[in-house]
Amino acid sequence: MFSLVNSNEFAQRADAEYFCVNNHRFVITFAAGVAQPVTWDCPRCGQSAQLAGSQAEAPVSDANRSHWDIVRERRTLGELADLLSQHDAQPKP
């Protein structure tokens, strides 16, 4: 006869935090003691994400840059806020 013993022991786990080029943050759980990959595909946008705290920076190619990335290269958030205020102040037709 079989003896049923409730001896479910789960493996130790460690969470790894990743950030993608679109500033999405997500956490992947790995078994403790396992080497965590430096890059992982973002589940929201599919872009390559970097392990938080890793020194290697993934190069952002032109194919991965969004319109927002290009705008942020040319303008600060303060400048963008000023432009939005000016646009909102214009009379609407």
Image (cartoon, rainbow, N blue to C red):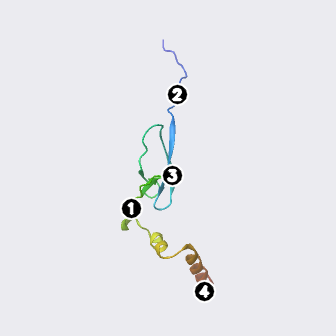
Please state if 6 lies on the left or on the right of 20 as rendered.
right
Residue 68 visible in the shown view: yes
Q: Which residue is disc 2 drawn over?
A: 9
Inter-mark Cα distance, 4 to 2: 65 Å
Crowd tier of the residue under label 1, counting other residues whose Cα lies within 10 Å: few below 14, some 14–19, many 20 or above: few
The mark that comes first in sequence, 1 or 2, is 2
Residue at coordinates 37% horizontally, 68% vertically from top-left? 62
Q: Amino acid at mark 1?
A: Pro
Q: Which one is in front in this view, the residue at disc 4 or the one at disc 3?
A: 3
Residue 3 lies, in percent from the top left, at 51, 15
* Pointers 2 and 3 in contact (C-beta within 8 Å): no
* Left or right of 30 on screen, residue 59: left
Image vertical order of residue 61 relative to residue 28, above or below: below
**Residue farthest along the front direction in this orientation:** 55
Distance from label 4 to label 3 (Cα)?
40 Å
Please provide percent x and percent y for residue 16.
49, 46
Q: Point out the frontmost of discs 4 and 1.
A: 1
> Residue 90, which numbered label?
4
Q: Which residue is rendered at x = 49% and y = 52% of the image?
A: 53
Q: Amino acid at mark 3?
A: Phe
For disc 1, the marked residue is 59
Under circle 4, the secondary element is loop
Single out the mark in the foreground, 3 or 1.
Answer: 1
The residue pinned by badge 3 equals: 26
Image location (x, y in percent) of residue 19: 48, 56
Rounded to the nearest angstrom, the CA distance separating label 1 from label 2 is 41 Å
Could you give the CA–CA distance between mark 3 and mark 1, rounded to whole angstroms?
20 Å
| Contact (Cβ within 8 Å) of mark 4 with mark 3 | no
Does the CB distance between marks 4 and 2 fall below 8 Å? no
